[in-house]
Amino acid sequence: MKKLKPYARWIIAVSALLLLSAYFVPLWQILMWAPQYPEGLEMKIWINTLTGDVKIISALNHYIGMKHIEVSMFPEFKYLIYIVAFIIGFGLLTALSNRRLMLWVYSILILGAGIGALVDFYLWGYDYGHNLNPTAPIVVPGMSYQPPLIGTKQLLNFTAFSGPDIGGWIFIVSGILTIGTLILELYATRKKVVPAVQ
Amino acid sequence: MKTINQLTIILLAGVSMSLYQCKPKGPVDATVGDAASKVYVAPGKYDEFYNIVSGGFNGQIGVYGIPSGRLFRIIPVFSTSPESGYGFSEETKPMLNTSHGQVPWDDLHHIALSTTKGEHDGRWIFANGNNTPRVARVGFKSFRTEEILEIPNSGGNHSSPFITENTEYVIAGTRFSIPMGSKDVPISSYKENFKGSISFIKVDPQSGRMSIAFQLRTPGFNFDLSRAGKGPSHGWFFFSCYNTEQAYTLLEVNASQKDKDFIMAVNWKKAEEYLAQGKARVEKVKYAHNVYDEKTHSATTTMGTEVNVLDIEELSDLVYFIPCPKSPHGCDVDPTGEYIVGSGKLAAVMPVFSFSKMQNAIANKEFEGDFNGIPVIKYEAALHGEVKKPGLGPLHTEFDEKGNAYTSFFVSSEIVKWNVKTLEILDRVPTYYSIGHLSVPGGPTAKPHGKYVIAYNKITKDRYLPTGPELTQSAQLYDISGDKMKLLLDFPTTGEPHYAEAIPASMISPNSIKIYKIEENANPYAAKGEGQARVERKGNDVHVYMTAIRSHLTPDNIEGVKVGDQVYFHVTNLEQDWDVPHGFAIKGATNAEILIMPGETQTLKFEPKEVGVVPFYCTDFCSALHQEMSGYLRVSPAGSKTPLKFSTGETEGQPAAGN
């Protein structure tokens, strides 16, 4: 059983505790600008809810047949709090258990959670942007309105931006700390390669 | 002969040319150098000051930006506004109630912005109705008229709505003296029967709600303008009086006979004492008090029946007269509160009185006599000094932060800058033409903001492109930051501005509300969602609880209404987004349209008189599909059996389309 260095255990514990912030700050943000909205519209995605100009965005999007955005549309909001709690718990356990195998699992867990969240967000965005009401007042043939996964995209008169909010950035830092620790551990305990031939 | 003729013609032409050159130059080139850059507010940038400008005979308030002179908004106050539905919607009709019934117009002369410790605080705008005596309060968050109080025992509310240092009181002084209590007496019995009246209106410091605390009953003459004391003179109020001759006909001659009229100094702290001691008599009166509730979006009227009256001829130490030359108009207190400037419209000098000298004169009883028992202080005893040869027809004075005064002169059409302490004239500039009031930002307060003086002129003539006999009104902006006043800009104004005030935008704009919160809407007829939209019949009254959101009205098909019904369209704007009002109008309505702000409910009454199908639609261009935001009302004959039906998005035999 490979053990962990003391500093590695501390970093893992910190990375896990950082994720507690997910309960207090928004994780993701979608910002939109249009000629009529120079001040911009925003939607903040939290661990269990949406805030910002959700109603206004929905009211505008109904012209092109997009669904009315409701918190109840997202079953994720019901179980995300448990998933994050599990990750935090596993991280703390990793620090306590002092086993490198646990760090491997924790790293995969945190990486998987990040990728999983992005995939989930992409799938929702695809459905939201493509599954349009055929009787919508404005139908542009061949046009779909999938919001950008990350970055900026022009959708009719709106420029939409999608990216991490404070909680998302903290999550990224936490992931980097975890995976960085794993790499350091591997590097520090790598086998000294002895040249076979002098 | 021919050559002589030619020579004569050349000579004549030469002489007339040179004579023409001798003619004085017109006002064309009056601005200087970089004036344009000083008033230029680039697209998307904001003005530095709000200018709150009375509308005179349009009964409204204009909101302008300074230094650009751009008009932002017209606030309906004493006049109906078919544009917004003010005075036409069921909710706002009571705002214009008076003891005479609904009076849909007034003559709005003066503005007073609320103050705390004598300085602007950005809470409220007060305005007077001169014709059917009223005082209005407008909120600075919504820029809407929130309250109108009718003034009983007044013949015309001109000396108003000036305020005390901490907005304890708003003043309403009668322009015309009248026989009190609706008496049928000969007009020639003026001296015997006619009385003046000054109302002290208490302002609630939290809500701003007004109530008449007491009235002063005065001898019968005319009150023109007034200002409260501040700093050392806090507790006193100064009023200009004219027609102390007590004339009742051909006032232009008969009210201009005396060398001196009065400035009336009122010790209102003393009046409060007398009131507390029960020295007031209660008189039966009738006046309307109209209040607009921001939560129900509705106005209500309550009728007042009593008023406390303090008779200044019976109570000592309450009022003193100071002689002031020739029919004074302005009666302005400087920022320190020590100096009171009288502007006798027909006088050759401008007296400046000293509050401390006036107090000494009262203590030493330096009186030259009395008027109906009220002491008249010796002119010299209260006088700080006279501004000599200031100009012709002084009207009104405001102050900057450097100890200077700016007085408007109607007859000589100019603004004169002078030093309040030394009384020395420092500069004069022409106005185009015949200035009435003027305004320095913060000019009437203890802490002027200075920088500009704005002239509100009474004559426009050739300043703008002509528009027939009726011309726009003309205001002018002058830079007063340097030693010399510089004309920067002419800008047209609506109505006929009298007095105006200017206040830094930074004190107002952050508090300006963008929407009304739908969850706080307490209008009993609100439909706070399309699920609540419905039509209900109660006898001949049909109530349509309608919602408006981009880009449809719910319901938009209504049947079962009959000729002779009274249909109330209660329209709730469900939007919660900035600058998305919806309008509502229906063909043949004999009142007006209504504009409904986001989160608000307003009601338009419609009385169908003919059988048919009547379209209605949204009048405020709200979205790309605004033109589609419409509906039909089917009107059946009286007594017909058409069932009451309403819907949106349903077509015959099909479920609703859309979401």
Image (cartoon, coloured by chain):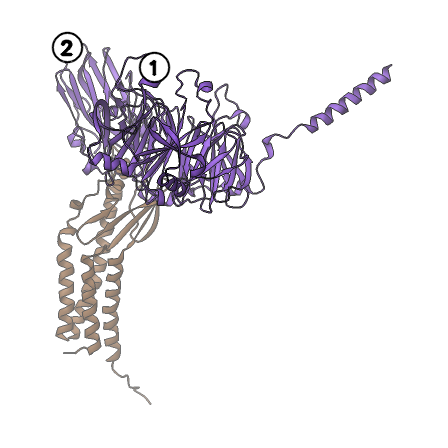
Chain colours: A brown, B purple
Instruction: Determine the chain carrying the residue at label 1.
Output: B
Judging depth in this view, the residue of B640 and B82 nearest the camera is: B82
Q: Judge left or right: residue B454 versus residue B267.
A: right
Q: Which residue lies furthest to the bottom in this view?
A: A198
Q: Which of marks 2 and 1 is in front?
A: 1
Q: Mark 2 lies on which chain?
A: B
Which of the 4 quarters of the picture holds residue B555?
top left
Q: Distance between the residues labelled 2 and 1?
A: 64 Å
Tell me what residue is drawn at x 21 percent, y 67 percent: A15
Asked if the residue under mark 1 is in contact with the one under mark 2, i.e. CB atoms within 8 Å, the reply is: no
Q: Which of B384 and B95 is in front in this view?
A: B384
Residue type beneath disc 1: Ser
Q: Of helix, strand and loop, which one carries label 1?
A: helix
Residue A164 vertical placement versus B89 (above, below): below
- Image label count: 2
* Left or right: residue B632 compared with residue B448: left
Q: Earlier in the sequence, mark 2 or mark 1?
A: 1
Q: Which amino acid does label 2 sit on?
A: Ser
Relative to residue A68, is residue B80 drawn left or right?
A: right
- Crowdedness near tag 2: few (<14), some (14–19) or many (≥20) residues, C-alpha within 10 Å: few
Quarter the N terminus of chain B occupies: top right
Q: Mark 1 points at which residue?
A: B189
The residue at which mark 2 appears reads as B640
Q: What percent of the width, then of the height, locates residue A115?
A: 23, 59
Say which quadrant the C terminus of chain B sits in. top left
* Numbered tag placed on residue B161 in the rendering: none
Residue depicted at 29% across the width and 15% down the height: B588
Picture quarter containing residue B619? top left
Residue B356 lies, in percent from the top left, at 39, 43
